Amino acid sequence: MEREWVVLAIGDSLTAGVGAPPEQSFVQQYIRLAETSLGRTILAENAGRSGATSGDILQLVRTDPAIKAAAERSAVITLTAGGNDLIQAAKRFYFDSDPRHLMTALKQYQRNVAHILETIHAVKAGSGPYAVVALGLYNPLPEFEEAAFWVGKFNEHLRSFNSGSVRVVDVYDDFLGREDDYLSDDRFHPNGEGYRIIAERVASVAGYGPIAEEPGA
């Protein structure tokens, strides 16, 4: 009997697919690309939580038994985090112009992502080949210099994790100047086309190698 193939998607509203119909989320579009490439059915386990911060996601990964079980079975795990950390800090910055709000959020984000990845690696120890695909942030407000600076800082920190089984997807340049094409009516979340770009970038970075052979083989 063939083993079931699973892709686990962990994260915030981008993982949940807010801004587009469910079948146009980046997770579902990536699954379709993988199924076409491999010629087999792949199950998507979507653990996206709209509004989740990196701290919320860390808590889920550490404590939710369903997510742990899905991670154990998954050869590709995607992660979106940081957007809500940045938004919450930006709101506080808006009221008092104190950049320490943003710096604190940046440092906490880096710590949380490190712990998320450590937790995933511990769960996956001895399970065979796998890839964790971490998505960087695009900038929905490129007209604001402060937004571009801090989105860049968050992405810079995320890229520091890019090694071994962790592959970082940078979509900043893909969205820059194409916001009208790739953002939904809320002007924050991607539309179906935006999610298509993300799915294709995930495929280009992760490929399908980790799910092209039996885990543990």
Image (cartoon, grey):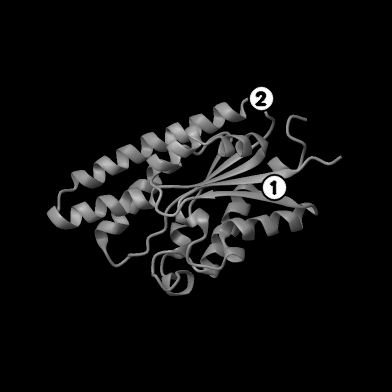
Of pointers 1 and 2, the one earlier in the residue sequence: 2
Residue at 44% across / 32% down in the picture?
115
Q: Residue at x 25, y 43 (%)?
A: 103
Q: Is residue 46 left or right of residue 159?
A: right
Q: Nearer the viewer, mark 1 or mark 2?
A: 2
- The Cα–Cα distance between marks 1 and 2, rounded to whole angstroms, is 20 Å
Determine crowd level at label 1: few under 14, some 14-19, many 20+ residues with C-alpha closer than 10 A. Answer: some
Q: Position of residue 155 (x, y in %)?
A: 40, 48
Q: Left or right: 133 with respect to 99?
A: right
Q: Judge whether 116 appears above or below 84 on screen.
A: above
Q: What residue type is labelled 1?
A: Tyr
Residue at the spot 41% in from the left edge and 65% down from the top edge: 176
Who's the residue at 48% across and 52% down the image? Answer: 170
Image quarter of residue 193: bottom right
Asked which quadrant contains residue 39, the reply is bottom right
The residue where tag 1 is placed is 208
Label 1: state its secondary structure.
loop
Quarter occupied by the C terminus: top right
Measured along the vertical axis of the image, is residue 127 above or below residue 191?
above
Single out the residue that lies furthest toward the left: 96
Q: Nearer the viewer, residue 189 or 176?
A: 189
Name the residue tied to disc 2: 126
